[in-house]
Structures are given as C-alpha cells and as structure tokens.
Amino acid sequence: MNINFFFEVLIGGLLSGVMYALVAIGFVLIYKASGVFNFAQGAMVFFAALTCVGIMDKFGLSLWLAIPLTMLTMIVLGMAIERVVLRPLVNQPEITLFMATIGLTFFIEGLAQLMWGSQVHKLDLPIEDVPMQFLMDHFDINISQFDMVAAGVCAVLVICLALLFSKTKVGRALRAVADDHQAALAVGIPLQRIWAVVWGVAGLVALVAGLLWGARNGVQFALTFVALKALPVLILGGFTSVPGAIVGGLIIGASEKLAEVYIGPMVGGGIEGWFPYVLALLFLLVRPEGLFGEKIIRRI
C-alpha cells in the first residue's frame, strides 16, 4: 500500500469532516438550547448560499458586500423562526416541534427559489482549488488548497463558538437553559432571548457552511442534502455536544473517504454515500447517546 496515497485520502477526509462538523454544530446549538431537532438546518444552508449569489447577481455587488448583507439576513431569519415558529409551540410535545421544522424546511426552500430563482449558480470565493505545492514537493501528497483553507475557516468558527458558549455570560445562560428550562426561568434567565440568540447564531453557521459547500459543489437545491451528512456526525458525537460534533465530523469524513477508496472497488461504487449511515447504525447499537452525549436515566 502506498503510504503517501493513504495519508492523502485520510487528510482529504478529515478536511471534509471539518465541514460536516460545521453543519452539525448548527443542529447541536438549537437542540442544546431548546430541545428541538431543527430539520430545517439544511434548508438554511441552501437559503444562505442562494441569497448571497442572488444579491451579487441582482444588485451587482461584490462578494465582500454581499456576505455582510447575507449575514444580516440569516441572523434575522434565524430570530424570526424562533419568534414565529418556536415560541408559540413552547411546552408542546417534541414531535410537534420536529414536524414544525419539517414544514419550515419546505417553506425556506420555496422562499429561496421564489426570491432568487431555481437555476444552478456558480459561487467563486477567492480561494484557488489547486494542489498545495509544499505538500506536493515534499511529501508527494495532493491536497486541495481550497479544502485546507475551508477547513481552517470552519475550525476558527468552531473555536469562536466554543469560546462564546463556554466563557461568556450568554454561554453560561445557554448551559443553564439546556439543563432545565424551568429552573433557568426561575433564576431570571430570559429564555426567549437566549433562544433568539441561538437561532441567530445557527443562521450565521448556515451562511458559512452554505458559502463553502456552494463554492465546492455549486449553489443548487442539492445543498439541502448536506444536512443529511450531519446526521451520522450527530449520532457519533452526541446531539448536545459541540466537541462531539467536531470529533464525529472527523470520524465520518475520514471513514467515508477511506471506505470509498479501499472498500469501494470490492463492493461497487457509491459507498461514500451510504457508508457513514451504516457506521452510525452500528454505533447506535453500542453507544446510543454518542461519544460525548449524556446518558439518559429515567426512573420508573
């Protein structure tokens, strides 16, 4: 086995895993704060990317002007979702909230295409998709410069979010809300304000994910399915853990690439699409709460 090629596949998978982790963190933030599995996170990723290219095409603005405008739009969208959809359903069964986010998915997808059209758009970021010359010259490893920079951007955002929710007053309030909504209200934590902040941050995360995946695969409806790749990540890492989303993303990204290259030829093509779900299913049998999830003990 060519060891250089092995590391090339492994590193490429890990870089993809960081981008999967970014999408998964959008799920984690909302689930941790409100107990809602936001099925609409993938639609928010699509909406963000399409809004950015739509603003550039329709108003002739540069990328650097379109990004702040899209960022503001996504924050407003996230907070509006919390106000219009989530808040009226407080104290409703979890399945009701989940079904609401499914309906929200189709609404956001339709709104995005109604505003900006349904054709495929090209999104050019100032990052060249070329092999990194240093790695090629010294290690004979072909790693895309785009993948490396994208993973770096995701890593910086993840670190900032981790610091925000572990070192700030908002973060402490979020952890209190996640532990017990009623107790948080009893000590004066503004529950609805915390939810609005979290949904706004989820919109910002969706923007970054949408720009990176849109530049890689084109801005198209298929971006909504990126969220489906986050599901195995969440199962492995745990639905309430930001570190778990990162570790789960790395595991899924690396395993799917290695499986495609080394197992794919033996079982046929397309293994990259379904192998993460098989891995997640096997993991559920061993540790249903995930690597970093908390075990739930119900007393009868």
Image: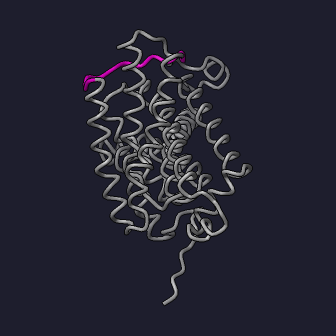
In percent of the image, x 44 and y 54: which residue is there? 232
Mark yes or no: residue 212 visible.
yes
Disc tally is 0
Depth check: give the residue in front, 223 or 277. 223
Q: Is 181 one of the magenta-colored residues?
A: no
Relative height, residue 144 to residue 223 (above, below): above
Depth check: give the residue in front, 216 or 180. 180
Q: Is 119 one of the magenta-colored residues?
A: yes
In the rendered image, the residue lying farthest to the right is 167
In percent of the image, x 55 and y 19: which residue is there? 131
Q: Which residues are magenta?
A: 117-128
Relative height, residue 233 to residue 297 (above, below): above
In the rendered image, the residue lying farthest to the top is 60
Residue 289 spot, x, y in % from top left:
51, 67
Relative height, residue 222 to residue 262 (above, below): above
In percent of the image, x 29 and y 34: which residue is there? 111
Report which quarter residue 172 is drawn in: bottom right
In percent of the image, x 59 and y 62: which residue is there? 177
Residue 33 spot, x, y in % from top left:
54, 57
Mark yes or no: residue 128 visible.
no
Relative height, residue 74 to residue 164 (above, below): above
Residue 204 spot, x, y in % from top left:
52, 36
Q: Main secondary structure of the magenta part?
A: loop
Depth check: give the residue in front, 183 or 240. 183
Q: Give the color scheme: rainbow, by chain, secondary structure or one colour.
A: one colour
